[in-house]
């Protein structure tokens, strides 16, 4: 956030039941979070935005791009799957069994307790995330292929996301075409970071900030 904010305005949204945003009695889904994000942009009078999403945020980004394409200028999707088979075998099974005690003493629990309106809501948040993964459903492949916005797909080579799945998303969004021999580079990019897991991806800012900034600042080519 700090690296990107040096050269651009950054809005860091804390979704329902996350951070400083209290939970409410309402469905908990990626599609709902996408609609909440769109509503925030509308409220702030922002007609188009570059959207960067990691993990859950990546899924939200894809839902925004399919539900409100008018809001998306460019998008960066890091460490996420668009379908249940996108993760390595057993990953989702582990997520579906997580319990609050698995996070005792971690940075996530401490950060939540420091800013949440109701620090006692931690266990409810974990239960909601677990239920959300049980019902996980990304946008259909045909909707992803119709997005059209410039995109960058990022995963770690030891991510929970299968590298083949990242390549599939990269191709669905319009990437995977040659850029030599006078052909313009496509507006869709793929980055697989070496020696990087799903969690350590968060700490690769020395790689991510210049890569993302250059992508966001690059003039659009219009190539497929």
Image (cartoon, rainbow, N blue to C red):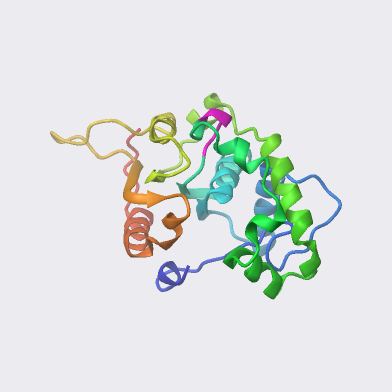
Extreme left residue here?
Answer: 181
Tell me residue 121's x, y (percent).
79, 62
Please say whether residue 66 is visible from this viewpoint.
no
Q: Is the magenta stretch mostly helix, strand or loop?
A: loop
Taking the view exactly as shown, the residue that stands out farthest to the right is: 25
Decide which of 106, 127 is in the foreground and name it. 106
Numbered range of the magenta stretch: 81-85
Which residue shows up at 43% across the image and 57% down it?
A: 200
| Residue 135 picture location, percent across and down | 71, 34
Residue at 62% across, 62% down: 13
On the rendered structure, is 207 left or right of 82?
A: left
Residue at image point 16% right, 35% down: 180
Q: State which quadrant residue 169 falls in.
A: top left
Q: Examine the image and state in which quarter residue 90 appears.
A: top right
Instruction: Tell me, yes or no, whether the highlighted magenta stretch contains residue 61.
Output: no
Say if residue 80 shows up in the picture.
Answer: yes
Q: Quadrant of residue 17?
A: bottom right
The foreground one among 111 and 192 is: 111
Q: Quadrant of the C terminus?
A: top left
Residue 31 image offset from top left, x and y in percent: 68, 41
User: How many marks on residues?
Assistant: 0
Which residue is drawn at the image coordinates 60% and 32% (left, top)?
139
Foreground pick, 86 / 186 = 86
Give the percent coordinates (x, y) of residue 55: 53, 48
């Amino acid at each position: 956030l700090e690296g990107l904010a040096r050269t651009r305005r950054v809005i860091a949204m804390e979704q329902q039941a996350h951070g400083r945003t209290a939970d409410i009695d309402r469905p908990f889904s990626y599609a709902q979070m996408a609609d909440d994000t769109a509503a925030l942009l509308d409220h702030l009078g922002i007609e188009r935005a570059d959207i960067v999403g990691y993990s859950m945020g990546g899924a939200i980004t894809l839902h925004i791009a399919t539900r409100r394409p008018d809001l998306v200028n460019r998008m960066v999707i890091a460490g996420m799957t668009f379908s249940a088979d996108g993760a390595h075998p057993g990953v989702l099974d582990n997520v579906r069994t997580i319990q609050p005690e698995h996070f005792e003493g971690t940075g996530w629990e401490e950060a939540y307790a420091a800013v949440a309106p109701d620090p006692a809501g931690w266990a409810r948040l974990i239960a909601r995330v677990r239920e959300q993964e049980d019902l996980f459903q990304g946008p259909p492949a045909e909707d992803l292929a119709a997005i059209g916005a410039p995109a960058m797909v990022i995963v770690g080579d030891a991510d929970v996301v299968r590298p083949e799945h990242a390549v599939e998303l990269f191709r669905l969004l319009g990437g995977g075409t040659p850029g030599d021999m006078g052909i313009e580079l496509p507006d869709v990019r793929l980055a697989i970071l070496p020696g990087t897991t799903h969690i350590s991806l968060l700490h690769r800012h020395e790689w991510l900030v210049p890569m993302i900034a250059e992508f966001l600042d690059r003039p659009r080519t219009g190539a497929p």
